[in-house]
Image (cartoon, coloured by chain):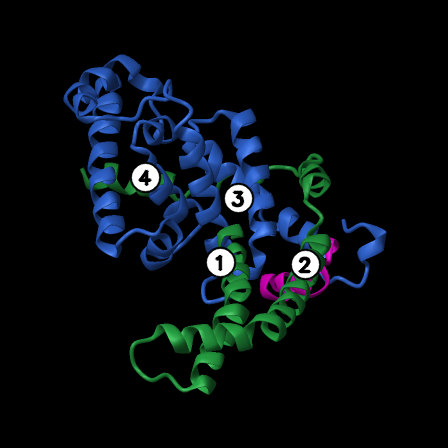
Amino acid sequence: MLPRAHRNLEVSDSDTTLVARVVANDDRGAFELLVRRHQSGVRNFLRRLTRNDVERANDLAQEAFIKAYQGLDSYRGSARFSTWLYRIAYYQFLNDQRGHRSDVEFCEDDHANAEDTAAQVGAALDVDRALERLSVRQRAVFDLHYKKGMTHAEVAEALELPLGTVKSDLVRGHEQLRAWLGHARGGTQ
Amino acid sequence: MNDKATNIEAELRAPEPALADDEFSVSVLARLPPRRRRIATRRWTLAGAACLGSALTAIFAPPLGEALASLTPWMLPPLAATTLAILVIVMAPGIYFLYSDRADR
């Protein structure tokens, strides 16, 4: 539901139209519509990256939208607005991550112990839990591709990664998920 | 193995829950900086820089041109020296403005 002051806005207005209104007239109603339209996706994306730290994800999402508002002049419309927005959210997370050393990334040693850990987790290890065990970049790639429906090229553009890196992250991530989930589920059968 | 892969693929593609806005957009809007003021400030900065550049040019260009012409070992025509001086004086605030604008982004 739109505020009364912005009745001239149409819910069907495209993102590009709304961005143009914000840039030209500082139309906050248009920006509010953009936030409402994308908040769920961005917050879910950041929850995935923060391993379901809801409060932190919400804070980062707010910061991402504010950064997007400040930088709207630089949005050229060559990519989808959502692609541009997820890039901002991703870098917002990475910048914040530097201050969160406790959130240890999945490293090579973890690979060696992956099967043991999976066995410990056992039946409780569902796909969402398994995704949390992937690296930050892989989590971002998987979320944008599978949950947001982006193509490989769009994911590469959003995360500013080479296309080959996106594809290999997906292939390797699949292998890891299959290993973890196969072990966990196989062990309970 | 194929069944497992298919299951994982299906689970990965399962739609994520839509999160209710719950005042999220309101709190984002409340924290937005005053964008119009920023634009207005930049316009005034640009206008001020242009005025300052013009004034400095009017005052210093002829003497600077002469000084440049006398300093160069080769024969620099006074008109070229004056043009060079004007370019330096006018472009300096312009470059600064453009740089600060980019750095802001």
Q: Amino acid at mark 4?
A: Arg
Q: Amino acid at mark 1?
A: Tyr
Q: Earlier in the sequence, mark 3 or mark 4?
A: 3
Q: How far apart, in angstroms, are the residues tagged by discs 1 and 4?
A: 32 Å
Badge 3, how many Cα within 10 Å: few under 14, some, many 20+?
A: many
* Quadrant housing the C terminus of chain A: top left
Q: Which residue is mark 3?
A: A41
Q: Which residue is mark 1?
A: B99
Q: How far apart, in angstroms, are the residues tagged by discs 3 and 4?
A: 17 Å
Q: How far apart, in angstroms, are the residues tagged by discs 2 and 1?
A: 16 Å
Looking at the rendered structure, the secondary structure element under dot 4 is helix
Q: Position of residue A28 (x, y in %)?
A: 73, 53
Q: Is residue A181 above or below residue B3?
A: above
Q: Is residue B66 magenta?
A: no
The reply to the same-chain question for discs 2 and 1 is: yes
Q: Amino acid at mark 3?
A: Gly
Q: Which residue is mark 4?
A: A137
Looking at the rendered structure, the secondary structure element under dot 3 is helix
Instruction: Between label 4 and label 2, give the one nearer the viewer.
Output: 2
Within the image, what quadrant is residue B57 found in? bottom right
Can the viewer see residue A75?
A: no
Label 3 resides on the chain identified as A
Badge 4, how many Cα within 10 Å: few under 14, some, many 20+?
A: some
